[in-house]
Amino acid sequence: MRREDVAARAGISTGYYAQLEQGRRRNPSHRVLEALAAALGLSDGERRELLALAPRPAAPRSRPHAAPPALPRALNALDHLPASILDAGLRVVSANSRWRGLHAGFTADESLADMRFLDASAPDFYLDWHHAVGAVLSLLAAAAEADGGTETGQAVSEIRRLRAESAAFERMWARGPAPAAQRQVRLRVRHPVLGRLNYRHDLFFGDQGGRASLHVLFPMDSQTAALTALLDLYAPSAGVRPS
């Protein structure tokens, strides 16, 4: 199988796969290794061997930065709506049970960028997937610019990682400047149990540098409002997971 075909099947860039083959990338994520095992059609034994032989990362990704005090206070007052606080790299600093319940079908829900670009559930969950990933791209680009493009900045680090691990992100990034980030967008999703939900996704920044933001989903119709009240049942702490 050609290198380009393997990379496409795994959903990673051809350049990143070439670096893995050549040993120039020594710490691929577990998600990338699982995707490569599937793309190569490895048996269960070969897959386990691949995961066991892979070196562990030297250090975990840094923890999300703490949010300004005003944002947690606002989050606490929004328990009736899906809401979360994200850092500049779009990693979840804090989220309420309805946000967790809405995203309960994802393998990991600690990064909005990972959910939209890397999780296999994303194309089924986001009814307008291209708009959803475009919004993430714009937010990361705006955060990187606000941070002065600092190489050690959260947004720049996430952009670098996503360009390596997501072929879709790399293609979109290579097209040129991202559209301006919007503070209010429409979000249509399909919950694995509750079905279609229509929201207005609003975001509010907690400081002038845009390093942390509050994300709130407002129901756009009465059916979505009624079903949103049930999301608490599917939050991980409730012990009910969508099948």
Image (cartoon, grey):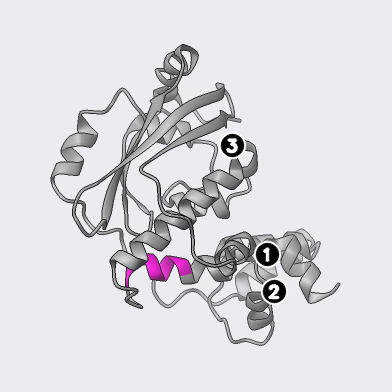
Q: Is residue 107 visible?
A: no
**Quarter that holds the C terminus:** top right
Q: Can you identify the residue that label 3 sits on?
A: 125
x then y, percent, for residue 175: 59, 66
Provide the major secondary structure of the magenta segment.
helix
x then y, percent, for residue 109: 45, 46
- At mark 1, the secondary structure is helix
Q: Are marks 3 and 1 in contact (CB under 8 Å)?
A: no
Please state which amino acid type lies under the numbered disc 2. Thr
Determine crowd level at label 2: few under 14, some 14-19, many 20+ residues with C-alpha closer than 10 A.
some
Q: Can you identify the residue that label 2 sits on?
A: 14
Q: Is residue 142 above or below residue 186?
A: below
Q: Can you identify the residue that label 1 sits on?
A: 48
**Quarter that holds the N terminus:** bottom right
Residue drawn 42% across the image and 78% down it: 58
The magenta-colored residue range is 153-159
Please state which amino acid type lies under the numbered disc 1. Arg
Q: CA distance from mark 2 to mark 1?
A: 24 Å
Upstream in sequence: badge 3 or badge 2: 2
